[in-house]
Each structure stands twice: as C-alpha cells, then as structure tokens.
Amino acid sequence: MDEIKLTNAQQHYKKMTQTPVAKLVITLGIPTTISMLITNIYNMVDTYFVGTLGESPQGSIGVLLTLQAIIQAFAFMLGHGSGTYVSKELADKNHVQANKYVSTAFFVGGGIGLIFSLLGLTFLTPLMRFLGSTETILPYAKQYGMWVLISCPFLICSLILNNNLRYEGKATYAMIGLVSGGLLNILLDYIFVKVVSLGVFGAGMATAISQIISFTILLVLYTKMAQSKISIKYITKNKLVYIHILKAGFPSFIRQGLNSISGGLLNRLAGHYGSQLGIADQTIDAMSIVNRISNLIMCVGMGIGQGLQPVASFNYEAKHYGRVKKGLVTTVAISFAFVFVLCVPVFFLAENIVYIFQKSQTVVELGTQALHYALIGLMFMPLYVPINMTYQSIRKSGVASFLSLLRSGMVFIPTLIIATSLCGVTGILFSQPLADAITGLINIPFFVHFLREKHNDEIQVATIE
C-alpha cells in the first residue's frame, strides 16, 4: 500500500512539474469552470422560478446572495488557505503535514458553519433586515434564508473539500461533487416550486437538500481519491498551522467578505434611492438578475484562474518559476478570450435575457441598462482575477490581500457612494462596472512586476508531451 501511495505521489509530482503549462492549466481549469457554471446556472434557475412568484419574492434572492457570500467567505478562506499548504506539502512530499492542514480546516469549518446556523436562525428577522430586505421582501427572505442557514455547515465543508481536491490536481472529482448537487437543485426547484407549489420556501429547501447531498458525494470522493486524508486524529494544536491557513486564505476571505458587505450596501442604496421613485423592489430585482448573469460569465474567467492555482502553488514550491509565469500569461489570455466571446452576444440580447427572469417593464428597463454596463466591466476581469490568485497561491498574502481589497472594497464602495449621490438609481447601475475597470488597471503593474521578477534558484526540468 505504501509503495502504491509513493508511486501515485511521484506521478503527481511529474504531472505538475513537467506537463506543458497551457495544457495543465486548461485541464485543471475546465472541470472547475464546469462546476462554477452549473452552480451559477442553478442559482439562475432559482432566480427564474422564484421570479415567477412576483417581484418581492425575487428580491429575496438578491438579499440572500449577500448571506451566501458571507458564508462562502469563511469557506474559501479555509479551503484556499489549507489547499495552498496541502499543495506545498505534497510538493515537499510531506503527506502527514498535508493531512494536518486539510483535517484542521475541515473540522474548524464545520464548527464555524454550526455557529452560523444557530446564531442566524435565532436572529433571522434582524439579520434579513440588516442584509437589505424591505418590508415587502422580508417574509420571503426569511423563508429562503432559513434553509441557507440550516445547510451552512455542509456548504462550508463542501467548499473546503472542493478546493483541496483542486489543489491536489484532482479538479475532475471536485467537479463531480458540485455538478451533482447543482443538477439536483435544478430538478428540485422545478418540483418544489412549480409542481408542489411551495414557493420561496420550496426553493430554499431545494438548495439545502442539494448542498447536503453534494457534501456527501465530495466527502466520499475525497476519501477515495485524495492523497491527503481527513481524520479527527490529524487536527493539530500547532498554532503555526492555523496561522498559515488564515494567512494564505485571507485574500479569499477579503474577496468574499467584501462581496457580502458591498452587496448589502448595494441593496440598501437600491432600496433607498428606488423608494424615492417608487421602484425600490424593482431596482433590487434588476440588480439581482444582472448579478446572476454577470456571475455566470465571471465563473468562466474564475474557473480558468482556479485551474492556475494548483499549478502556481506546486511549481513555485518546486522552484519552477518560469512555469508559474507562463501559467499566468496563459490564464490571462484564455480568460479574456472566453469572457469576450460570452459578453458580445449577451450585450445584444440583454433585454431578452432580463425579460426571461422578470416580465415587469420597469425591471426589464433597469436590468437591460445595468447589464450593458456590467458586460463592459467584465472585460477587465481577466486582468485582476488571475493576478490576485497567483499571488495568493505562491503565498505572498500581503500583495494578494491588497489586490483582494480593491474590486468590492477600496474601489467599489467609494464608487458606489459617490455614483449614487450624484446619479441616484443610475449610479446603482454603473458603479460596479466602473469599479471593475479601475481594479483591472491597478493590477497591471503587479502583473508586469511578477513577470520581470528574477529567481536564482530556479530548477529546469524537461517537459513531457
């Protein structure tokens, strides 16, 4: 058995350090992209089915996006933080230490999820108001939010498993777990909302059930396929392990955490300025729809970027720096090509696409205008996502954390406040795309610096075809 494990480890090392970089990034990125596509598609299915119930029910989906971003902030911090060091330890052929990182992150994540569930369910009404619910949206937000909170521990642990599988170069197995849950969610949405007529409550229940089953599948796959092992006995008391996980994962926490803060602020300002025109719920609905569509396109660039993460982490530790630089350039180019191909047709079909989700003329008009702006902003995503992920994966957490602060925080929040104070509801529509453009431009010097950086200890290895 030990000989088999050693052979697998040797094969993995050879694969990560000798496979052509472009091929490796695409091979690892495509399963992740598919996973994210399916996840976002079932989110859009939620939006569609709940949208058939009316404007206020659909507004609850936008509010719950913020709560889900908060939960995912902790999950990605633990998943990316542990995954980065699992990849590092596997490159150093230290499997016991890899076990400690993933086991510690897994059980800590489950504990955090349980605390979220208990506190969130106890203070459900004030939490939904804090996230931006209007009085008409609040009853529906509580129905959906209850299920999001119940499934919280399973979601966090699923994302930790998913990210560690990716960092081990087993993105296909990570994809199977997430895609299975996503497809099940689509089916259950149809049954619970359309057939059984359970409304928003049914949509939330469908999400919870699918996330629990997805977690179960991922756990089984991890147990059978991963090089690192999850067990209570590997939970460590070593403070350095916790510091490493939190430090490496902090950029992910910033990205997702700021998404929740900015999302809540966006909902509040949309409700405030929309109410002055009598279109508060419609404005929140429009932005909810546009965010779902934007996320669907973003997941392509994000998926390819996440394919780069294990390549960058493993090769940087193995001192193959040229492969890391080539991987970054390749990822930026591929991401831009995919995003461009997707954005162009959506731009011209924007009104028809928004109409699918909500038939209200006001929502369609606001959503179409916002989607046009959003698509322009998305063209800058291939600059800032891969660069940020690269710095995080090579454990330069200071730079990665600064870059993570930009899009949804240091740039977006001031942009949103200034834009809405000057332009009202119109400012709500274009503030995020403007922040995307500024963030992309700020990332360019970091991109150039990384490519020009010299390393004297680089190891050269022949490429296998």
Image: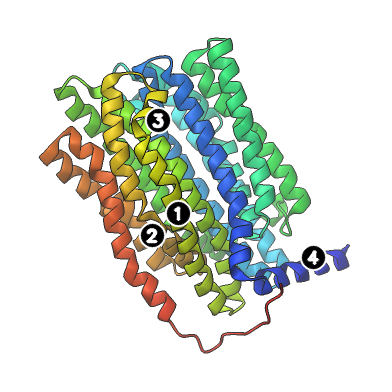
Disc number lying in front (2 or 4) = 2
Image quadrant where residue 137 sits: top left
Disc number lying in front (3 or 4) = 3
Disc number lying in front (4 or 1) = 4
Q: Residue at x 33, y 56 (%)?
A: 405
Q: Residue at x 24, y 23 (%)?
A: 280
Expressed as whole percent of the image width and height from the top left, the position of residue 44 reads 47, 31
On residue 252, which mark appears? 1
Q: CA distance from mark 3 to mark 1?
A: 31 Å
Q: Residue at x 47, y 18 (%)?
A: 200
The C terminus - image quarter = bottom right
Toward the viewer: 205 or 344? 344
Image quadrant where residue 399 sits: bottom left
Q: Earlier in the sequence, mark 2 or mark 4?
A: 4
Q: Earlier in the sequence, mark 4 or mark 1?
A: 4
Reading the image, the residue beneath label 4 is 8
Q: Disc 4 vs disc 1: Cβ atoms closer than 8 Å?
A: no
Reading the image, the residue beneath label 3 is 353
- Residue 116 is left or right of residue 10, and the answer is left
Q: CA distance from mark 1 to mark 2?
A: 13 Å
Is residue 401 shown to the viewer in this render? Answer: yes
Q: CA distance from mark 3 to mark 4?
A: 47 Å
Is residue 63 shown to the viewer in this render? Answer: no
Position of residue 313 relative to residue 418, above or below, is below
Judging from the image, what secondary structure is the residue with disc 3 in? Answer: helix
**In the image, what residue type sits under mark 3?**
Ile
Q: CA distance from mark 4 to mark 1?
A: 30 Å
